[in-house]
Amino acid sequence: MPEKTGLIYKGRPMRRKDNIIYYGSMADKYIIMMQILETKKIKNMDVATKVAIQLQLTDPEIKSRDKVIKKSEKDSLYAAMDIASVWLERALASR
C-alpha cells in the first residue's frame, strides 16, 4: 500500500488546520505559519483577501512569543505563498 502524502509545495509539506496553514517540516529549524484573516465570496468560493505570514523557529524550548523571526501581511494566498517560500528557503539555507 503506498504511503499517504499530504500537499507538497516547492518540495516542502503543507498542512492546514481551520484558517491556519503550516508550510515546511517541524524537523527543520524554521517553519512558516500563515493565518487567513479575511476572506470574500467569489462564485460561492471563499477566497483569502488578508493573510498573515510568520517565519518561526521550531525549537520547542523557545517561548511562543520569541519564535517569530519575521512577519508580514499579504492580500492574497498566492502572494503569501510566494513570500513564504522565499523566506523559508533563505532561512534554511543560512544554517
Image (spheres, rainbow, N blue to C red):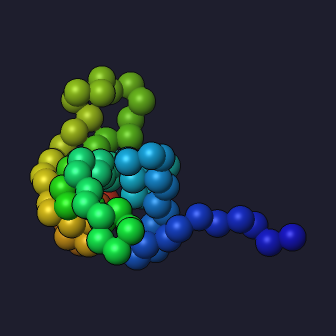
Quadrant including the N terminus? bottom right
Report the residue at 42% width, 58% height from top.
24
Q: Which of the two residues, 81 or 67, is positioned nearer the viewer here? A: 81
Residue 69 vertical placement versus 23 (above, below): above
Quadrant of the image occupied by residue 78 = bottom left
Q: Is residue 44 visible?
A: yes
Quadrant including the C terminus? bottom left
Taking the image as shown, residue 3 lies to the left or right of residue 55, namely right
Q: Which of the two residues, 39 or 21, is positioned nearer the viewer here? A: 39
Report the residue at 28% width, 44% height from top.
56
Residue 18 vertical placement versus 84 (above, below): above
Q: Which of the two residues, 94 or 52, is positioned nearer the viewer here? A: 52
Percent position of residue 4, x then y: 71, 65
Report the residue at 38% width, 68% height from top.
45
Percent position of residue 67, x then y: 26, 35
Q: Which of the two residues, 60 or 41, is positioned nearer the viewer here? A: 41
Residue reaching furthest right? 1
Residue 26 vertical placement versus 24 (above, below): above
Percent position of residue 50, x then y: 18, 56
Percent position of residue 30, x then y: 34, 49
